[in-house]
Amino acid sequence: MEPFRIGVLGVSGHFILRVLNPLHKSKKVEVYAIASRNMQKAKDAAEKWGIPVYYGSYEELLADEKVEGIYIPLPNHLHKEWIKKCADAGKHILCEKPLTMNAKEAEEVVEYVNSKGVKLMEAFMYRFHPKWKRAKELVEHGEIGKVLSIHTVFSYSNNDPDNIRNIKDYGGGGLMDIGCYAISTARYITGLEPKRVVGLIHYDPVFKTDILSSGILDFGVTRCMFTVGTRMFPQQEVTIFGSSGVITVTIPFNDFPDVKAKIIVQTKIGTREVEFDPVDQYQLEFEGFADAVREGREMPIPPQDALNNMKVIDALLESANKGTWIEL
């Protein structure tokens, strides 16, 4: 069978640095085309990185009948527009997180793609890593008893005024960029949606984007607490506390594809490390997306999941603004 042909909208640094190389190794997926609003930029990227076809506009790429799916790594404020245009062109869509700027937009695009009969998936690559699947299995099998709390920290340091993460109108800020991971992992591990949330947010006085955000997600019995920051020393860890054990996911999101991953499991009989052979979670993500399209089945991460995650982000922002708990 021919590889699933992907077209990429924009010459994104994230795509070039993290996604492209693993896809070149895939037998299931081919990065067939790339588009930029600057023809020379698209041409240079295609020639440098071995992409067969390039275009000087996104519309030209969408008109290419050989392209089956579109990857959207564009700034957040452009997601809604280009998800719809991809759907109009009959292309299946893998869109970077967060899906849109808010839950209203997310609901709109989910309904729209459904009406056009195309598939849509939010690009949370961590869901495809074996260590996360194993952590969820251990929780579901009762390895650590009842899950009572999940603690997440995720941070980096970036004060570049030209970086899209520091531009408010582009959907910048730590909560949208990395807080979405803390929310997603809590929902993934518990298999539940939070009943209410409370958020505390500190904004940059110049950029007006959040640079330190903390939140509590109340699932009933289980509570998730997280802090994300964009002016902090880089750190990331997720700890799942149960009534009879603890699971720690080290380097939960930015795994190195050539290094063994691990989770640490603590129970009353002792502590053990569960290791996983090196994999590239981006390759697994794109292949999972392609397989679902080709086989005509539901996306590994359904669009409703993206909408639910966005609802929590909205509620945390509202909570921080009002200084109170917000029910969902």
Image (cartoon, helix red, strand yellow):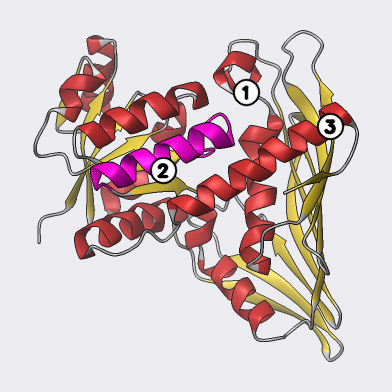
Residue 88: x and y, percent? 22, 32
Q: Quick one: quadrant of the N terminus?
A: bottom left
**Label pair 2/1, CB-CB below 8 angstroms:** no
Task: Tell me if mark 3 has few (under 14), some (14-19) or many (20+) residues whose alpha carbon lies within 10 angstroms of its own.
Answer: many
Residue drawn at x 22%, y 11% is: 39
For the residue marked with disc 1, what is the amino acid?
Gly
The structure residue drawn at horizontal position 18% and vertical position 26%, both measured from the top left corner, is 61
* Magenta span includes 71: no
Instruction: Judge from the rendering whether residue 253 lies leftward or rightward of residue 150; answer left or right.
Output: left
Residue 152 is left or right of residue 73, and the answer is right
- Residue, disc 1: 172
The residues bearing labels 3 and 2 have C-alpha atoms spaced at a distance of 27 Å
- Say above or below: 165 vs 160: below
Task: For marks 1 and 3, give the CA distance.
Answer: 17 Å
Q: At label 2, which amino acid type do we have?
A: Val
Residue where numbered disc 3 is placed: 320
Q: Based on the displayed image, in which of its 4 quarters is residue 297 positioned? A: bottom left
Compared to 303, does 321 lie above or below? above
Specify which label sits upstream in the sequence, 2 or 1.
2
- Left or right: residue 75 versus residue 272 is left
Q: Which mark is nearer the camera, 1 or 3?
A: 3
User: Looking at the picture, which amino acid does disc 3 mark?
Assistant: Ala
Residue occupied by mark 2:
110
In the figure, residue 150 lies in which quadrant? bottom right
Q: Quadrant of residue 31?
A: top left
- Taking the image as drawn, is residue 188 in sight? yes
Q: Is residue 291 above or below residue 140?
A: above
Q: Is residue 99 magenta?
A: yes
The residues colored magenta run: 97-118
- Residue 292 in picture, x, y percent from top left: 29, 61
